[in-house]
Image (spheres, helix red, strand yellow):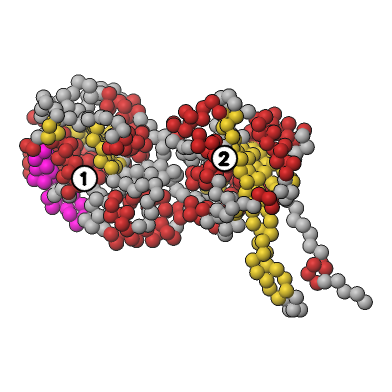
Amino acid sequence: MTWNRQAAIRALSFFEARLVHCDGEWADKPFVLLPWQRGFISELFGTLNDDGTRQYRTCYVEVPRKNGKSELGAGVALYLLTEDDEPGAQVYGAAGDKDQASIVYRVASEMVKRSPYLSGKCKIIDSTKRIIVPSTASFYRAIPADAATSHGFNASGTVVDEVHVQPNRKLIDVLTSSMGARRQPLTFYITTAGYDRHSICWELHDYAGKVKSGVIDDPTFLPVLYGAGEEDAWDDPEIWKKVNPSLGVTPKLSFLEQECRRARETPAFENTFRRLYLNQWTKQETRWLRLGAWDACNVALDMGALAGRECYAGLDLASTTDIAALVLVFPREEQVGEVEDDDGVTQAITRTVYDVLPFFWVPGDSILERSQRDRVPYDQWVKQGFIQATEGNVIDYKAIEAKLDDLAQTYFIHEIGFDRWGATQLTQDLQDGGLEVAPIGQGFASMSAPTKELLNLVLGKRIVHGGNPVLRWMADNMVVSTDPAGNIKPNKAKSTEKIDGMVALIMAIERVSRAPKPKRSVYEDHGLESA
């Protein structure tokens, strides 16, 4: 395998001599590749096998928005269509839906119209979103994800735009599996980051990272990755420069500054900014709770002071093969100041603060497999005592019952809230053992108020959680659903990682909210008078 200068120059010249930009300030100007684009286009098309065919069969490009992805995808598609020496070439522009599939097609067709060279070779058929080359019986066709049920593909090239919106892997599998008879097939992926870590895009992202780092040796796969790391500060302009290789040309620095200000002022926009402009994989589409706000509540718990105090519990049993979570919430009054009334009497100003004590259980037999599969350090958390692994391949609810019985000897547990649809023998056993249990519906009616209250408590630094890493991870994973009336509730289905501890915390807060408030004596406010 060697780098062939002539083959690389042929590809570079096609972009810069045959193509022009179609939109904005660059419209009708030659497609002069930026250094990062020249680098990987040269490597992709210039690295050849001994028989003269291309070495790379897959190229995965992950780059932030506004760095010219659609134009690059269109250029690669047109090169494969017209310059690949592939009789009967079939090049497909694949996308998640019809609108997305139309984007690269529209750019490609405009490039053809504005190029004397290409317009003389190609014919555009807008009605079927095809560009054909009659002389070689070749075509480019835009197809959405629902075309996966079609048959008869014989792809020589595939350009997959915005892979993160692919609903599943069906279309990609159908297209790549159809390439077996082709001499030098190429699948070209180009996308921004996503948030679903169970998607085909995350699978490709993960594979590309391993190839780039040398963990996987795959000489047919070319990874091109521009993105911020998980620990990189999303509002740091130096990080923007590192991950936006076209910065200054497109996007403009002033644009990113404007969007960053919006993300700072609107927490729900933070994840959008991070995904689109830093190419940073987030854990949910829209962030509900900023991790910085959660971390600001990381105050060490005084375990000795908790003994004997009253508390309320939330218990999320989930499934027997997953994670079970128990969270105790200890409300207390904290003095924040003093005020003098009209009679000159000084009164304390207090606020309610909630000390939070979480516990977690997982099946012990699957702990290593779960850690490797999910890339979550369950095994380390077990060693550190933050999770209890019960024997067997399902959670032993007897271990939870025993823990609750033990906790009840140390703390005054008023009530244990649990999912009324998840009622099991455990809740009956707890009740038989003298503990009060209360079923809580998981719909908007029951969960909205305590979910909103949790956010208020965190933002007001009225939660003290001690920095438990498992609960922190779940707080970072948290996704909520909203109904037309503005009610919210946790959404496990949309949370790509576990949030059971947060659900348990919300249920505990719900029980606190229903507890009768202590009545104040009139003498506490006015004092005792005698005749």
Whole-percent x and y of residue 386? 57, 40
Whole-percent x and y of residue 173? 31, 27
For the stretch drawn in magenta, the main secondary structure is helix
Whole-percent x and y of residue 53? 13, 27
Q: Quadrant of the N terminus?
A: top left
Task: Say which quarter of the image contains residue 71.
Answer: top left
Q: Viewer-proximal residue, 84 or 507?
A: 507
| Rendered image: mark on residue 386 | 2
| Rendered image: mark on residue 71 | 1
Structural crowding at the residue carrying mark 1, measured as other residues with C-alpha within 10 Å and reported as few (<14), some (14–19) or many (≥20)? many
Residue 204 shows in this picture? no
Q: Which residues are magenta?
A: 8-30
Residue 21 in magenta stretch: yes
Residue 269 in magenta stretch: no
Whole-percent x and y of residue 284? 44, 44
Structural crowding at the residue carrying mark 2, measured as other residues with C-alpha within 10 Å and reported as few (<14), some (14–19) or many (≥20)? some
Q: CA distance from mark 1 to mark 2?
A: 49 Å
Residue type at tag 1: Glu
Residue at image position (32%, 54%) is 239
Residue type at tag 2: Phe
Q: Nearer the viewer, mark 1 or mark 2?
A: 2
Residue 191 shows in this picture? yes
Q: Viewer-proximal residue, 307 or 129?
A: 307
Residue at image position (69%, 33%) is 401
The answer to whether the residues at label 1 and label 2 have Cβ atoms under 8 Å apart is no
